[in-house]
Image: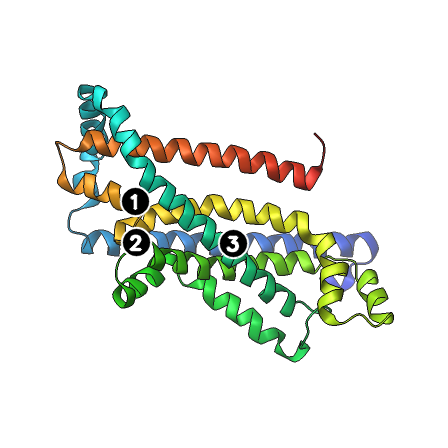
Amino acid sequence: MTRPAHDLTGLDAIRHDYLRMTRQRQLYTGVLILVFIVLMVAGFDTADSRNAGGFWEGLNQIFDFPADVISEAIEKAANLPGHIMGALPALIETINIAAVATLIGCGFGTLFAVLGTRGLALWPALIPVFRRITDILRAIPEVVIALVLIFVMGGGPVPAMVAIALHTAGAMGKLFSEVNENVDLRPVEGLASVGANWSLRIWLGVFPQVLPNYLSYGLMRLEVNIRASAILGFVGAGGIGYELRNAMTFGQGRFDEAAAIFIVLFVTIVVVDQISSAVRHKLTHGGQ
């Protein structure tokens, strides 16, 4: 027979409390999993009912498009080198969009991070304002910003660059502020004691500590932005994604061109990922 909790003492009381907390945690976990499953099933059912075609009815055709692209690419393999060379200007445009957007976004992200970090902010009362700005910027997807800008500015690489830069500023502002939270404030306080102004305290006391992590996060974001730039091309924002959309829109007869663009994109992303990983490892861990 189990004794009441108020009669338990010492080790028995600790065991009783631990088992009670474990049961509560298991109950909460089970409820959360159940809610998650219900939401997933309901969401999938709603999306499937509003889709142009049913998911289950079209599941057997999921590999038809890749098969058509691969078969046509094999048939016209002699054309692939020419298509790859023809896709390089659009690829360079895509990389330029991602690089410029990353530089601008990381610049503003650094500013938001410094102004939104306790102990470093120039105006401590405005810390919540700068943090909410970064929240808003990273909450809006790039494609939504790009569509609005395309409506205002017309199609081309500039809307894509601005859209990616805004989202990057929000994301990097969050990541950089977390890095800033771990800085050693003693150099900053030492500079303040000799009369250094705020900009000098940040430049000499903070940036030497956080720069390796900043660069690491920036390179990682460049990888993401190259993919985002390619995706935004589908909505008319220029770059290699725009060429891929055109090749896919025309359908059979130009699938070999689409295959060449897929190859260029895949190779580019792999190369950028490997270079970025090597540089980030050197920045964060040192070594040869």
Q: Earlier in the sequence, mark 3 or mark 2?
A: 3
Residue identifier under label 1: 241
At a point 66% along the width and 36% down the height, the residue shown is 282
Foreground tag (3 vs 1): 3
x and y percent of residue 103 in the render?
52, 54
- Label 1: which secondary element: helix
x and y percent of residue 177 in the render?
63, 61
Q: Earlier in the sequence, mark 3 or mark 1?
A: 3
Q: Amino acid at mark 2?
A: Ala
Q: Quarter of the image holding residue 70?
A: top left
Residue identifier under label 3: 103
Whole-number angstrom distance, CA of label 1 to CA of label 2: 8 Å
Q: Are marks 3 and 1 in contact (CB under 8 Å)?
A: no
Q: Quarter of the image holding residue 90?
A: top left
Picture layout, residue 117 above or below residue 249: below
Q: Residues within 10 Å of mark 2 (few under 14, many from 20)?
A: many
Whole-number angstrom distance, CA of label 3 to CA of label 2: 19 Å
Q: Which mark is residue 18?
A: none
Q: Amino acid at mark 1?
A: Gly
Q: Nearer the viewer, residue 91 or 28?
A: 91
x and y percent of residue 151 in the render?
26, 65
Q: Which mark is residue 237?
A: 2
Q: Residues within 10 Å of mark 3 (few under 14, many from 20)?
A: some
At a point 65% along the width and 80% down the height, the residue shown is 125
Outermost residue toward the bottom? Answer: 125
